[in-house]
Image (spheres, helix red, strand yellow):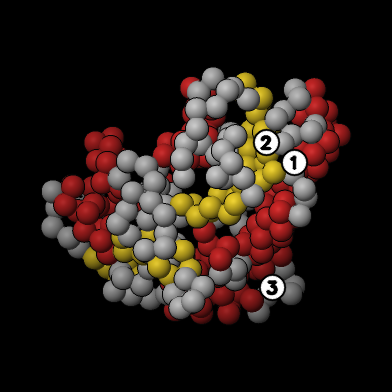
Amino acid sequence: MTELAERPRRIALAGASGTIGAAVLRRLQAEGHEVAVVPRATLAEPLALAQALAERACEVVISCIASRSGAPKDADAVDYGANARLLAAARGAGAAHFILLSAICVQKPLLAFQHAKLKFEAELQASGIGYTIIRPTAFFKSLSGQVKRVKAGKSFLIFGDGNLTRCKPISDDDLARFIAGCIGNPQAMGKVLPIGGPGPAISLREQGELLFRLAGKEPRFRSVSPAMFTWAERLLSLGAPFSTRFAEKAEYARIARYYATESMLVLDPVSGEYSADLTPEYGSETLADHYRRLLAEA
């Protein structure tokens, strides 16, 4: 997708307190856009939200919000509900473009938050407003949880043989640049855009091998069976009809199993398989760059 050097726009940004949202805010400000940050609390107040966007005459609305837990109640309230209120306010303010940060995993929806995201995606596409839906692959942050383990000389945890899944992770800044590049870009209007980092696609085992190599340590792996999440989900589901807490924990087990077994790549509609070749690459920052920084800081 070609990036355009457009005139500064009046932009409302929701989700700026998150990792990706903060990177988007930095990028928009660096490009000279006039950015109004929408506080999370304001998203729960339709009248205040509508007034805020109308007063600033926002031309573009960008949503980087997402439920923190992925639990059904949280997903419905944020991934769908908060975005739906933001869309209504955007239409009322006369905004011409709504850019939504979604997720690549909605291609194969098995979880509550994925269904909530898809519900809003459909509402956005039918709204009549110009839209761009961005579905990134894995974030660097989501692949960083074992850096301290490796630094401390512990084993790197993998599921099965470590090659069950693959992804093309993208950095916060590269994704922010991609999002900003959609503003005023006719190539992005009315599109659903999957996007990955510079590639190539990498498995969990390969992430571990990379991390050990950069840390100057011999690779040590410990295999965990994804079946443990299946059994946990079945056990917790027994109590779900009687307890919200059990229902949420059962969903967390489903989420864990999903990410242990499903690749974060474009799903080939013909073969039904995940395809690295069909997953677009963007940016310059690699996972190796990210790991080097974290190892230096650890």
> SS at mark 3?
loop
Q: Are marks 2 and 3 in contact (CB under 8 Å)?
A: no
Give whichever of 255, 92 is nearer the camera: 92
First reached walking from the N terminus: tag 2 or tag 3:
2
Disc 2 to disc 3, C-alpha distance: 38 Å
Q: Pointers 1 and 2 in contact (CB under 8 A)?
A: yes
Q: Position of residue 44 (x, y in %)?
A: 78, 40
Instruction: Tell me the residue that label 1 is attached to.
Output: 86
Q: Is residue 153 above or below residue 255?
A: above
- Residue matched to label 3: 240
Q: Which residue is under mark 2? A: 61
Residue 228 at least partly seen: no
Q: Would residue 38 be found to the left or right of residue 269 on screen?
A: right
Quadrant in the picture for residue 49:
top right
Q: Earlier in the sequence, mark 3 or mark 1?
A: 1
Residue at 56% across, 69% down = 108
Quarter of the image where the C terminus is located: top left
Amino acid marked by disc 1? Leu
Q: Secondary structure at mark 1?
A: helix
